[in-house]
Image (cartoon, coloured by chain):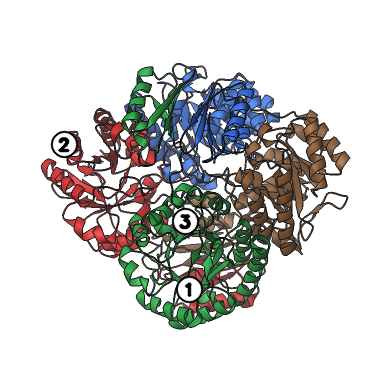
Chain colours: A red, B green, C brown, D blue
Amino acid sequence: MIICMKQGAPRTQADHVIKAVEDAGLEPAPLFGTERTVIAVLGDERELDMKKFKAMEGVENVMPVLRPYQLVSRESHQGDTIVDFGNGVKIGGKEDIAIMAGPCSVETEELIMDVAEHVKQKGAQFLRGGAFKPRTGPYSFQGHGEEALKWMKKAGEKTGLKVVTEVLDTQHVDMMYDYIDMYQVGARNMQNFELLKALGRKDKPVLLKRGMSAKFNEFLLAAEYIAKEGNSKIVLCERGIRTFCGYSRNTIDINVIPWVKKMSHLPIILDPSHGTGSYEMVQPIAMAGVAAGADGIMMEVHPRPEQAWSDGDQSIKYDTLDTVLDGIHKIAEVVRK
Amino acid sequence: MIICMKQGAPRTQADHVIKAVEDAGLEPAPLFGTERTVIAVLGDERELDMKKFKAMEGVENVMPVLRPYQLVSRESHQGDTIVDFGNGVKIGGKEDIAIMAGPCSVETEELIMDVAEHVKQKGAQFLRGGAFKPRTGPYSFQGHGEEALKWMKKAGEKTGLKVVTEVLDTQHVDMMYDYIDMYQVGARNMQNFELLKALGRKDKPVLLKRGMSAKFNEFLLAAEYIAKEGNSKIVLCERGIRTFCGYSRNTIDINVIPWVKKMSHLPIILDPSHGTGSYEMVQPIAMAGVAAGADGIMMEVHPRPEQAWSDGDQSIKYDTLDTVLDGIHKIAEVVRK
Amino acid sequence: MIICMKQGAPRTQADHVIKAVEDAGLEPAPLFGTERTVIAVLGDERELDMKKFKAMEGVENVMPVLRPYQLVSRESHQGDTIVDFGNGVKIGGKEDIAIMAGPCSVETEELIMDVAEHVKQKGAQFLRGGAFKPRTGPYSFQGHGEEALKWMKKAGEKTGLKVVTEVLDTQHVDMMYDYIDMYQVGARNMQNFELLKALGRKDKPVLLKRGMSAKFNEFLLAAEYIAKEGNSKIVLCERGIRTFCGYSRNTIDINVIPWVKKMSHLPIILDPSHGTGSYEMVQPIAMAGVAAGADGIMMEVHPRPEQAWSDGDQSIKYDTLDTVLDGIHKIAEVVRK
Amino acid sequence: MIICMKQGAPRTQADHVIKAVEDAGLEPAPLFGTERTVIAVLGDERELDMKKFKAMEGVENVMPVLRPYQLVSRESHQGDTIVDFGNGVKIGGKEDIAIMAGPCSVETEELIMDVAEHVKQKGAQFLRGGAFKPRTGPYSFQGHGEEALKWMKKAGEKTGLKVVTEVLDTQHVDMMYDYIDMYQVGARNMQNFELLKALGRKDKPVLLKRGMSAKFNEFLLAAEYIAKEGNSKIVLCERGIRTFCGYSRNTIDINVIPWVKKMSHLPIILDPSHGTGSYEMVQPIAMAGVAAGADGIMMEVHPRPEQAWSDGDQSIKYDTLDTVLDGIHKIAEVVRK
């Protein structure tokens, strides 16, 4: 931690800060410059609320030096985390690019079965689909709930696909456990800390979607919540952030992919369906994500998007899926060989 | 709903869209322009997923015409909603400006009692304080939980202050009910829809803080979730949004105050502590909020901010509180007479 | 400047950085922590490109300590700058709140004369109006240019109002000089550095509008460009920044007003017309701005907004102007007594 | 244009709007719904200021239907624009991926010559470098100006590279003409409309960088300014937008690449140096850009970034350039075959 005093702050104010640092069990190293005093602080600042120093008289600014996350940090772990789903399905490292595909909502048993068979045949390893839907408005379809989970489980068993679906509330965590292969935390719940803790106490993998306004450290600290409780099977997912650009549903922060690779050992995948909001952009952006180093792609697929109960505009059709996967795999060959 | 076809889209594509509109039980009114066909749609579009039309061939864009929220809309309700807490404490309309003050975290029983007595004496009607703390990182103090609620209740009973505190999880809703006077939904949970529904089934007022990246409609639709379940005692709260400006913790969207007044009958208050992140800015921004029409101000107050367990940098001291309240009341006299 | 080395960076890398700091004429003060080496740097870092240190091997981050602006900094100047326009018209400090009013575009001589007389009578000190219009699209009305300047000058002479209008290009600076009392730099040109330099070499006041995506330091550094050339008659203007909120034209960053007061001696005014984009919000937001400490308000006024050639939706009518000014002056009495 | 009346707006208000539409020479098509009246307007709305209708009583909202840009629109031009620089160097369509490389600032003649020879040998077609530098602060190096242009021209002639450099002011346009092959408009000047017009009257290609807060339509309308004056040799460039994410210098809006391809016939390139601000991210992001469909990549290259006068942290070294180009070309083979 670095504490910058205000210009012209009297020596007594600096002395108070120095004493407060010592009282907190850390070692102050003051530097008295010509314009300003700077107090460098040695020791672990992470368990401490740094804001209290900013409340002291004469303090201009307090800057952290250490990264606030630990378990998910690249510094804490040799090599890349590879999340293993059994039957040879893995995400991370140099493993095959992971493909998660399926409808936005699990509308009917027939639909999910049909999509599952189609995407399996095309090479996907995961079936996605919403049973509990976090809809912006209360008058929109809210999902079929547990009934839909049963259909998904059946589709997963029939096809061998791993099932991934969103969990909205701590009260659903146990109930969902037996139906699914991976819990998904949606963007709106990335900082639902009680939910993160509950998932951290399970042994099933968690797909953690980045919040719409999550800074990098916040994203990794959400993962840290899960890891701290004991569950290290975490896959991160970039799905677009909220910016001033209105032409696409969200703005994909493509930079975050190499930055996660640099700062963390966790795998990261990209969701071009939510990240763009437009079926026409899924292919180029999926390919861009793989080129940037993503370990997988999650896509919304629907046989008849114009009849979908939700997100029809960003769902691709079966025949488009072929083209998209072809593009993804060609890029993956270049970057993941 | 207005559906714009692409330039040069053939008539057959427009015909498909027209038929789909009819199939959805709505009435299409197509206009064949020289450059583009536009299909206006009469009828209630709100229960429908408009995105499905955007998935149809030849469609360029789909624009809603009706506001997606109903119960919380100004159009649905004559006059302003006034939330009544008993003992003459009310928020909204031409009622006195509401003052909510207290520490960020309920650190000890002594602290909360001391703050309660002080802020009561200065004219606050509400005691705020965190029992369950949604902290960005898992290594930060997470709050004393139910124990802290007991202290708050005692402080409320002793001083006559109404108690408002944050609820983080559906599993805490019932337990908290008897301790508090108002549930607070934090910014990170504004779209925790299961939590909103659970609070909608209670009869206690809800303080709904705007999410950091919440658009206007999303903010009002979150309130609509609560209202739809039967609870209309809702107070909105602007606490700053996330922008590129790094100098303040958040950017207060001051425009939202008059816009809420125009579009909704619900009261809205401002939180200048989180909205600025700096004790030095609380006064001018609190005054600005009242001038813009806010029905109340929520502030973090601490006797010794430099020892606070959280948010010390944005908490004001007791003597500053006097000055801040003086400024607030002078402005309130001008705008709320 | 503080240079943080990466965790585990070998001592030789730190030694290279230390040497580079010395070569740059600064004094390094290295601190060898258990996890990380931090090199504090004493001396003036402002003339130096700090990024070069970030390019060195083993460097994780480089943080500035000194503020990058000097002449416009509160630290460099006792008291508030008061910009004097003659005839008792001044902006800043405890001077009367400045009112700048007029149409978006100077459409006709009759219009500008009519508006000038009206706003003068209501107590405005400045006439605003666009002669050169920076329009988003090339097919929109681009302004009458020098002809409009002549009309404005005439209106200023007749009414005693000071004339403020936007300058778009360095080639117009000299030509405009005799027609106007204050150059306005629009948001889109806040970082048109050649224009800033040219205005810095003039002795007329400059109204510097904040760019839509300008960070705080960038805003003050734009002012520093003007000041460095010798012109210290600078008035800052907040007119809204670009955010994800689409319901208002821009998002007013109300926090910037007290922050400018803290960090700089320059006056700052607010433009609620561009900051909201809606005539219905001008009054509450103008009042909020004054409550937050703004030294003036700039507003678009038009006798018939529904016929305005530009910005009709955010222009207020004559009768609304009365109400708005009444509100502004009541708040000003509270905060500027 | 679609004009939505407020709910409950009386028929007389709608009639006024209908008449105003007719007076503007357009054809109104009113639809009287149960909740609201909607007035669709047939005819070309682009030369009109739509905001004036929003100023009319009873109007809730006005929505454009036509795209505001014309010449640069995909609808106006069959096929892709290919900008031809002579000697077989072209950008756009299925042409080879364009590589623009060079230092941030043209520091010395030796430097630019050295870099030019190196990047030419590696396969770049363009030499970039700043002669006039738009620096955030006035105390930073502002570029060598015309002297640097002479060195660049010499380097271009010696190596056969095409020279591209930034123009900051209308007064430099003529002087620069003979030294360079392509004018660059920087992000800060994207809406310097006088500059755009001046370049539109030249016959040299223009590289138009997207402004940090430019919406899609604003980006294309800036290009339209150039095209309207007669110069259609325009290459767009995405270089990152300003968002709340602080970890990278800017946030690359990767979505804009396929969206430009859909909406316009102009080529678009990506600048991963400014878009990330970090030499470590240049390779994966350059590859992502090509995968998304970019027609070229612009990169900052410096033999000794730790001694660069500007942007050292985002400049790659010579040996890194080899790896980056290898990655780019492998991806280009997949997507541009």
Disc 1 residue type? Lys
Which one is closest to the eye, mark 1 or mark 3? 1
Q: Chain of mark 1?
A: B
Q: Give whichever of D155, B86 is nearer the camera.
A: B86
Q: Secondary structure at mark 2?
A: helix
In this orientation, which residue lies closer to the viewer: B321 or C191? B321
Q: CA distance from mark 2 to mark 3?
A: 42 Å
The reply to the same-chain question for discs 2 and 3 is no
Chain to which the residue tagged by mark 3 belongs: B
Residue at the image position 59 percent from the left and 52 percent from the top: C253
Crowding near the residue tagged with mark 3, few <14, some 14–19, many ≥20 C-alpha atoms within 10 Å? many
Q: Earlier in the sequence, mark 1 or mark 3?
A: 1
Amino acid beneath label 2: Glu
Q: Mark 2 sits on what residue?
A: A117
Looking at the image, which is closer to me, B42 or D299? B42
**Is residue D297 something that shows in the picture?**
no
Crowding at label 1, few (<14), some or many (≥20) Cα neighbours within 10 Å? many
Pointer 3: what residue? B210
On the image, which quarter does residue D153 sit in? top right
- Kindly identify which residue carries mark 1: B162
Question: Horizontally, is A230 left or right of B107 in the view?
Answer: left
> In the rendered image, which quarter contains the N terminus of chain C?
bottom right
Report if the CB atoms under discs 1 and 3 are less than 8 Å apart.
Answer: no
